[in-house]
Amino acid sequence: MDTLSLAKNMLTAATGAAKGHARDLENYLRARVKLIADGTAAIAADRLKGKITEEDAKFAFDEIRESEKTAVLAIEATSLAAAQDAINAALAVAAQALSTAAGIAVP
Amino acid sequence: MGSNPEHLPRARSCQLSGDPPTPPLVTALLSTFARRPGTLLAFLFGLLLAGCSVLLIAPYDATTDRLLTDLTVLTETVVVKADNDQLSVVEQEKFYAEAEGTVNAMKMRAGLYAKNEPEIAALDELGKRYHALHERHASPRTSLTTGLRATLLDVQQIQVAKKRSSVFSSSLNKTSTSQ
């Protein structure tokens, strides 16, 4: 068995599996930044129009700050899913190689 | 892919080490594998011989995703009404009660799965965002709900990641069964 070639194929499969998650993460972060930018502008506009009080504006911004905790959780979950797919993709390539080289059927 | 939990994890799963596996563990593994490709091969062949696939995060749950989509639509609709001063106090209170109830139901469901800590923690935070607005009797205007809507987006991203993983696992299973 050519282990160097196998390792290369496994790494290619792993990288390919993680790429989709990376694209999703980029789209998500872009959408999140836009949402917060629009929301901050809305806080300023509502305050100027007298629709909300100064205390309301402080509350709204504190809530935005609090929401950063869940942004970290979303990134953590995406990283875990990407790592899982990458490892399983590499495993699938290795299973195929093992099956071809030694005739061992891997479940 | 169905919504029943029993339909989701198709491969047998096993833990790499410790309980639960953490991102630092993944980082350490990837770093070791990058320095010593032989370790990666030995590790993966060990897993292969054990007939394992790796499960680092709970599987995608279509019911949770649907509840979240419904909650997002409800929230965005109410925000538009509030922005246009068309939301009565009664409707506002009903919205907060319904939203908090939905989040509680989602938390209960999320607790049924192993390796679902990030989603459970995110739902806890989502509940806090609704509760803070409810307690304040705040009008759910765009200006006051940005933190809440950002948190909704975060929970949606968790569903997107899980769904991508679920589709990927299915394609791997199809490939392996067709060979």
Image (cartoon, coloured by chain):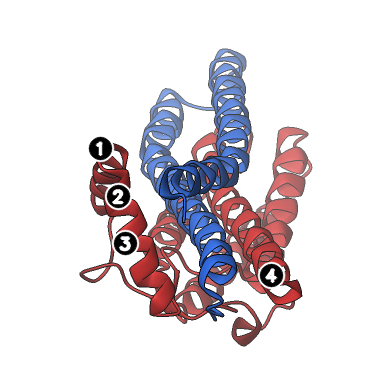
- Going by the numbered disc 4, the residue's amino acid type is Ala
Is residue B87 visible to the viewer in this orientation of the structure? no
Q: Nearer the viewer, mark 1 or mark 4?
A: 1
Q: Are discs 2 and 3 less than 8 Å apart at CB?
A: no
- In the image, taking residue B178 as reference, residue B113 lies left or right, namely left
How busy is the neighbourhood of tag 4: few (under 14 within 10 Å), some, or many (20 plus)?
A: some
Q: CA distance from mark 4 to mark 2?
A: 39 Å
Q: Which residue occupies the extreme top position in the image?
A: A48
Q: In terms of depth relative to the viewer, which is nearer, B177 or B105?
A: B177
Q: Quadrant of the C terminus of chain A?
A: bottom right
User: Are the residues under badges 2 and 3 in a single subunit?
Assistant: yes
x and y percent of residue B102 in the render?
A: 59, 69
Q: Are discs 3 and 4 less than 8 Å apart at CB?
A: no
Q: Secondary structure at mark 2?
A: helix
Q: Which mark is residue B38?
A: 2
Name the residue carrying label 4: B62
Specify which label sits upstream in the sequence, 1 or 4: 1
Chain B color in figure: red
User: Are the residues under badges 2 and 1 in a single subunit?
Assistant: yes
Chain A color in figure: blue
Q: Which mark is residue B35?
A: 1
How busy is the neighbourhood of tag 2: few (under 14 within 10 Å), some, or many (20 plus)?
A: some
Q: CA distance from mark 3 to mark 1?
A: 14 Å
Q: CA distance from mark 2 to mark 3?
A: 8 Å
Q: Secondary structure at mark 3?
A: helix
- Going by the numbered disc 3, the residue's amino acid type is Phe
Name the residue carrying label 3: B43
Q: Secondary structure at mark 1?
A: helix
Vertical placement of residue B11 versus B137, above or below: below
